Image: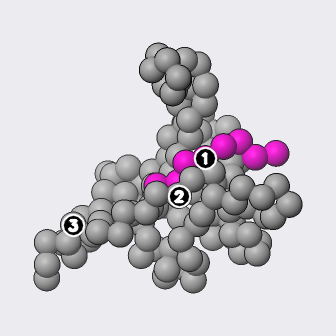
Amino acid sequence: MSLRQIAELDLGLILEDSVTGFGYSIVLTDPSGKVRPFTGFSDDISQIIDPDTGEAVSGRLASVAIRTSSLYAAGLSLPVGVSDAGSKPWIVEFDDINGTACKFKVSQSNPDRALGLITLLLELYK
């Protein structure tokens, strides 16, 4: 087994373990309406860096990280951001630490094909 394969297995232990790892329930809906539950890492913070000034400002930055092998095993492709307002986006839902349900759409998709991880940058979805 190669080091990359070992690293991907370790990723599963860290990312998908909800007892001793970072695992957190995430629901992903593809544009066709398929809904699939996953365990991964989510974050939702209120401080971002202003690209014009480089200063920290109040804002909202949410993302999730999911193992790509889990996406493929569920019969899904890699999620992507959909910029066309007339098209259905990929939807991501998770509860914050206080149990408040949050619903986002994927705005940017950053797959790491060497490790087998995809990080999805999110924006609020109404």
**Label number found at residue 7:** 3
| Front position among marks 1 and 2 | 2
Element under label 1?
strand
Q: Residue 120: within the magenta?
A: yes
Determine crowd level at label 2: few under 14, some 14-19, many 20+ residues with C-alpha closer than 10 A. some
Q: Is residue 13 something one can see in this rendering?
A: no
Q: Residue 40: horizontal and vertical position, in percent?
A: 46, 57
Which residues fall within the magenta stretch? Answer: 119-126
Q: Nearer the viewer, mark 3 or mark 2?
A: 2
Labelled disc at residue 32: none
The span from disc 3 to disc 2 (Cα, nearest Å) is 21 Å
| Residue at 75% over, 46% down | 125
Please rate how many residues cluster around mark 1, counting C-alpha atoms within 10 Å: few if below 14, some from 14 to 19, many from 20: many
* Rendered view: 39 above or below 2: above
Q: Is residue 33 left or right of residue 94?
A: right
Which is more foreground, mark 1 or mark 3?
Answer: 1
Say if 53 sits above or below 71 in the image: above
Q: Mark 3 near mark 2, Cβ–Cβ under 8 Å?
A: no
Distance of label 1 from label 3 (alpha carbons): 26 Å
Quadrant of residue 98 in the image?
Answer: top right
Disc 3: CA contacts within 10 A as few (<14), some (14-19) or many (>=20):
some
Circle number at residue 109: 2
Label 3 secondary element: helix
Name the foreground residue: 112 vs 44: 112
* Kind of residue indicated by mark 2: Ser
Instruction: Provide the residue designation for mark 1.
Output: 122
Q: Does the magenta-highlighted stretch encompass residue 53?
A: no
